[in-house]
Image (spheres, rainbow, N blue to C red):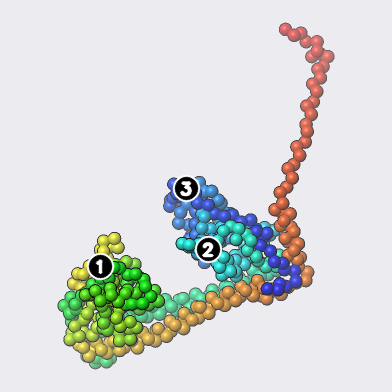
Amino acid sequence: MDLPKGWVWTTLEEISEIILGQSPPSSTYNTDGEGLPFYQGKLEFGKLYPTPRKWCTAPKKIAEKGDVFISIRAPVGPTNICPETSAVGRGLAAIRGLGGIESFFILYLLRAFANEIASRGTGTTFDAITGNQLKTFAIPLPPLAEQHRIVAKLERLFKQLDAAIDNLKKAQAQLQRYRRSILKAAFEAELTKEWREGPSDTWERMKLSEFITLESGSRPKGGVRGILEGIPSLGGEHLNAEGSFKFEKIKYIPEAYFKSLNKGRIYPDDIIVVKDGATTGKTSFVDNDFPHKNAVVNEHLFIVRVDPKVAFPKFVFYYLFSSKGQQQILSDFRGATVGGISRNFPLKVTVPIPPLTEQEQIVSELERHLSIADEIEATLDTELKRAERLRQSILKHAFSGKLVPQDPNDEPASVLLEKIQAEKAPQPPKRKKRTTKAKTTLSPKQMSLPLD
């Protein structure tokens, strides 16, 4: 990349002091606020500043207020600004600008080149970069005065962009509330009130156990081998929050193992309920468009099959998916370490059951409303991704000299580098002045004093 006049290529090491984190003994950690805030990695990062989770009474490496944190392992690249004197663990490095270079200039610089820094990461279990890789990372350096103009312009633009992103996220939250309200209205006889043209006294509440059969998934004989061909084996870890499966993450089992199973195969109109793990209680529906016709479920899932003479399977799915249904399912939750929910959960779930014709109408109305919400959400997701791409584009412009105008009167960056080198150069030790002891002279009177 060609640089504007007055800019130079240099390295992070040339413009800053880099403090590589080091973890002290775990016996010096605490959560009571004793000692210095102790930061270890991205998990503590916020939008600009980290939030401490631990403190340390005997830190090995210390960052000062205004230093820029960069995560150097799992993952590589995320950045924050140190809010106060803090201990630094080995997952981070602290970068301290020299020669008057501002913290926010370094922060934005690192964010502009985050992908390039991350690409240097290596490792067998997780990515990490070495101190030398960080120190020798090449960066474009503008004159100091232009750095100030770049930071000021970025902050104005990002303030506007952040406001737009906040509005998009608020719209997403409102959309989630809208979905919950539509589901709530559906099962309180409100959604079909005009269609029904009469009271809802034809509705009754039934225990789920009265009109379903329950089947548990099972672990295939020989276990899931993760081969690329065979039968997909679905688990709770593959389920998205909205009830759809992430098929790109699903493991497959050989056909021979599948044939040995006598349970766990799913069919259209089945409802899948997660019985344990991080997604306990979440539900999914197997419709006719389900992409894998011969899928099976593992031991972490239940299969619910509805008697179609009593209820439409999809009507029951939407109820179990609703906030009320989720509450009832999780009322049987026994804890993550003792098996999640049991086979008895259908005894604790009661479902409002209208006539079949009204169930069909409710499903139709729900899908109409929810499909509109899905379209809006897709638009919001697209706009959020576009906003993040715009942020990176602005940063790239900033550090290629295209965001603010150059001023020929600015002191070139090469002079700034010379000043930083002089600042970093070891100072010769100060020579101590020799002091001579004053001779003691005695007065004649003192000389004449007797010795005893």
Q: Nearer the viewer, residue 345 or 152?
A: 345
Q: Quadrant of residue 21?
A: bottom right
Tell me residue 308's x, y (percent).
20, 85
- Under mark 1, the amino acid is Ile
Judge from the rendering whether residue 396 lies leftward or rightward of residue 449; answer left or right. Answer: left
34 horizontally vs 237: left or right: right
Using a 10 Å C-alpha cutoff, classify the residue at mark 3 as few (fewer than 14 neighbours), some (14 to 19) or many (20 or more). few
Q: Of callouts 1 and 2, which one flags the residue occurring earlier in the amino acid sequence?
A: 2
Instruction: Read off the residue under disc 3.
Output: 25
- For image coordinates 65% across by 66% down, the residue present is 139
> Residue at label 2?
122
Label 1, on which residue?
A: 341
Between 276 and 315, the residue placed more toward the observer is 276
Query: In the rendering, at what x and y percent does residue 115 appear?
Result: 56, 70
Residue 8 percent coordinates (x, y): 72, 67
> Would residue 254 be seen by someone viewing this image from the given angle?
yes
